[in-house]
Image: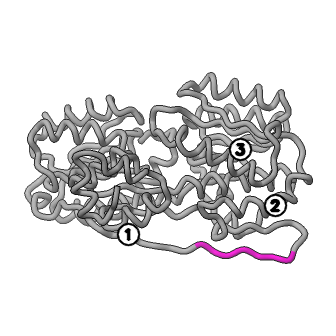
Amino acid sequence: MHSVTKKVALTAVAGSAALVVAACGSSSPSSSAGSGSSGAAVPLLSLGQIDNTFSAMATLKPLVAKGKGSIAVILPDTVSSTRYVEFDAPYLKESFQKAGLSSSQYVVQNALGSDATQFSDAQTDITKGASVLVVDALDSGVGAHIESYAKAHGVAVIDYDRLVLGGSRKYYVSFDNVKVGTLMGQGLMKGAPTDNNATLFAQGYDAVLAPKFSSGWKDVSNPAGTWDPPTALSEFQQQYTAHPNINAALIPNDENGAPIIHYLQNKKIKAKTFPTTGQDATLTGLQNILTGYQCGTVYKPIYLEAQAAAALALYTRAGITPPSTLVNGTTQDTQAKVAVKSALLVPTWVTTSNMNSTVIADKFVPASQLCAGKYAKACSAAGISG
């Protein structure tokens, strides 16, 4: 059985062949973004101009005077990943500020895991004069509801981080999620149909793992679940009890992987003997990589995504078509059967070999926290100074 399932997305691998070949890979493909154009009255921003200084946002100041209404961002929750509070919200606010919006011209909210709250926030924002919504929908159901309501009120929507299936958004901004899945699959050598990211992740890691399954690896299970660590742990425990020869797990989220790794440690599973994967480069995930219990994590520099989303919102607010250097691809909405214009960013696979030059250099995780206590020796071995 090998299919796209719900958000916890575990692929457990077992069998004698896996005992030999299941291991953490080190593949880390790279790609470069294009460069922008200049000389026009309207600023032309490219993804390649965006970095962690946020200086590129200042080039968009001419768009502010051309626009009308406010921009409202509605993030999904505070549980599935710490990123929304620690990074997305402050990065989005900084992006708008650097672009010249006043505090009355934008708002960044969090639905706290409630579909009803997310829809209500959208209604309230539109009533207060929002002309653009940037929404990371909790699921495609509420996302489509928000987008239908917004369309009826003449308000444009930008899908942030995950695509709303069956939606009517104008643009989509995210990391290349097929590439995310590819990195996880390569690093190891499934989520809900309502979450298109899970489908795209699966496209990536299915393509990498399929030859392994054909040559002896066994795909034991793809349990259904949610982006919820306790659920992830419960489902893994059930599978591990039923199949005690499982010796690897493809887990697409550091926070879901953490309790599973702790469970394995309590089972006296030794480091570097049970490959697992992750995503989001959380402190816990990075520490599990340092100690050999996680192969790596997909790092998505959120300052890139936040600025790209803010830029798209500013162009949209001004009624100006964004340049192809910003909207660099399309993503298929399989329900609405349309190709959605997209700003797609490049993720990075992080292991001990490049941790210092990526997440530490970007100040995504402070070295002092990463290397505290028992992790100091592992940090030193990876060339990281706490």
As measured in the structure, the alpha-carbon distance from the residue carrying label 2 to the one carrying label 3 is 17 Å
Mark 3 residue element: loop
Q: Please tell me which of labels 1 and 3 falls first in the chain.
A: 1
How crowded is the residue under tag 2: few (<14 C-alpha within 10 Å), some, or many (20+)? few
- Per the rendered image, the range of residues in magenta is 33-39
Please determine whether, in this image, residue 55 is positioned above or below residue 228.
below
Position of 357 with respect to 71 (left or right) is left
User: Residue at the location (82% across, 40% down)?
Assistant: 105
Relative image position of residue 46 (x, y in whole percent): 69, 68
**Badge 2 or badge 3: first in the primary sequence:** 3
Q: Residue 377, how many percent across, how many down? A: 21, 56
Is residue 242 positioned above or below 290 on the image?
above
Residue 276 spot, x, y in % from top left: 26, 51
Residue wearing tag 2: 321
> Which of the pair 325/5 is nearer the observer?
325
Label 2 secondary element: loop
Question: What is the CA distance from the residue labelled 1 to the residue labelled 3?
Answer: 34 Å
Q: Residue at x 10, y 63 (%)?
A: 20
Give the number of the disc on residue 28: 1
Quadrant housing the C terminus: bottom left
Residue flagged by tag 3: what amino acid is it? Ser
Q: Quadrant of residue 335?
A: top right
Residue at x 10% of width, y 58% of height: 19
| Amino acid type, label 2 | Thr
Q: Residues within 10 Å of mark 1 (few under 14, many from 20)?
A: some
Q: Earlier in the sequence, mark 2 or mark 1?
A: 1
- Asked if residue 249 shows in the view, the reply is yes
Is 170 magenta? The answer is no
Q: Which mark is residue 168?
A: 3
Choose mark 1 or mark 3, whichever is in front.
Answer: 1
Q: Secondary structure at mark 1?
A: loop
The amino acid type found where label 1 is placed reads: Ser
